[in-house]
Amino acid sequence: MRLRCRLRLLWVIPFLLSLVLLAGCEETPTGRSQLALVPDTLMARMGGDAFDQLRQRQPVSRDAAVNRRVQCVARAVVAAAEARYPAADRPEAWEVVVFEDPSPNAFALPGGRIGVHAGLLRVAETPAQLAAVIGHEVGHVLADHGNERLTQQLGIKAVLLLVGLFGEGELGQQQLMQALGLGARLGISLPFSRAHEEEADLMGLAIMARAGFDPQASVALWRNMAEAGGGQPPEFLSTHPAHGSRIEALQDAMGEAEAAYRATTPADCAG
Ligand SMILES: [Zn+2]
């Protein structure tokens, strides 16, 4: 009797999982299917809170020239990103802040908060190279990568919780394997960081070109990054694809980006 009851309960897990998958499977701006189940308003609030905390801990750059250059590039990049990916959910407002930090880094938080370290300006030598980094960060936001990553982490925890509640011993183990197998087939239990970085690279390339920055500068930027890191890559690159493969992927998409660049008015953020 107990076994039959447990078997009946085990049906609930795949049923719930398939409901969740049907409800939440979406496409990123580049057409990759994605599971991002956390409500956008919640993601934006979490991103905003984290950004506010950072701003309290970390001094903001008061260098007028640096701020002017970063804001000029960011304005052009954000406008181009929204025009290039009109179907993507965009944040209510974008906010780009330069932090007083010597490391060549940049980051994006859900809700459109982008942080640029002052040290990035040593490596991103031209406005176009800066546009490659900011375009990449805007790509992470528009493709909802933060939500996807959190969904993955919560999803794995939810499966473990369900298995813990409804199944014990051998049966529970079997159910867990099934759940993880299902996850693997759908690609949701694989590490996403590399796929995210590659997608953000390609979106960033398309965005910078549309914003009027020479897309070839992206290749120069990643070369500078590699040099700046020496043997030890900067933090920004630690989860990123190897330089060789990322430059190759950029070059594969360069033809299209150059055509888009030629069709726009070049941006002017040199001042
Ligand atoms: Zn990235």
Image (cartoon, rainbow, N blue to C red):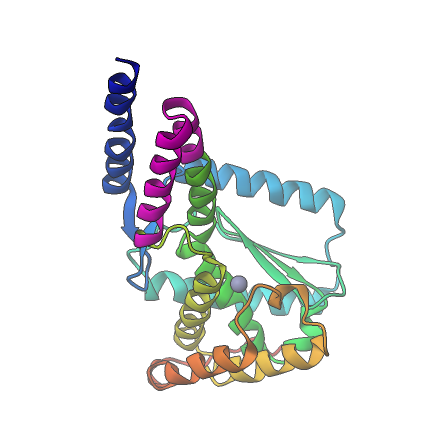
Q: Residue at x 40, y 80 (%)?
A: 265
Q: Is residue 84 magenta?
A: no
Q: Quadrant of the N terminus?
A: top left
What residue occupies the far top of the structure in this picture? 1
Query: Is residue 186 shown to the viewer in this render?
Result: yes
Q: Nearer the viewer, residue 149 or 60?
A: 149
- Can you say whether 267 is above or below 176 in the image? below
Expressed as whole percent of the image width and height from the top left, the position of residue 109 reads 54, 50
State how many labels appear. Answer: 0
Q: Locate residue 141: give its quadrant.
A: bottom left
Query: What is the x, y in percent for residue 241?
Result: 52, 71
Query: With 137 as the anchor, is 258 left or right in this view?
Result: left
Q: Nearer the viewer, residue 258 or 161?
A: 161
| Residue 125 shows up from this direction | no
x and y percentages locating residue 175 in the rendered image = 34, 35
Residue in view at x 69 percent, y 46 percent: 55
Determine whether 15 is above or below 230 in the image.
above
> Start and end of the magenta stretch?
158-185
Q: Which residue: 35% across, 30% down?
A: 171
Residue 73 rendering spot, x and y as whole percentages: 54, 69
* Residue at 43% across, 74% down: 205
In the rendered image, the vertical position of residue 48 relative to residue 236, given as above or below: above
Q: In terms of secondary structure, what is the magenta stretch mainly?
A: helix
Is residue 181 highlighted in magenta? yes
User: Which quadrant does the C terminus fall into?
Assistant: bottom right
- Looking at the image, residue 96 sits to the left or right of residue 38; the answer is right
Compared across the picture, whether 164 is left or right of 72 comes to: left
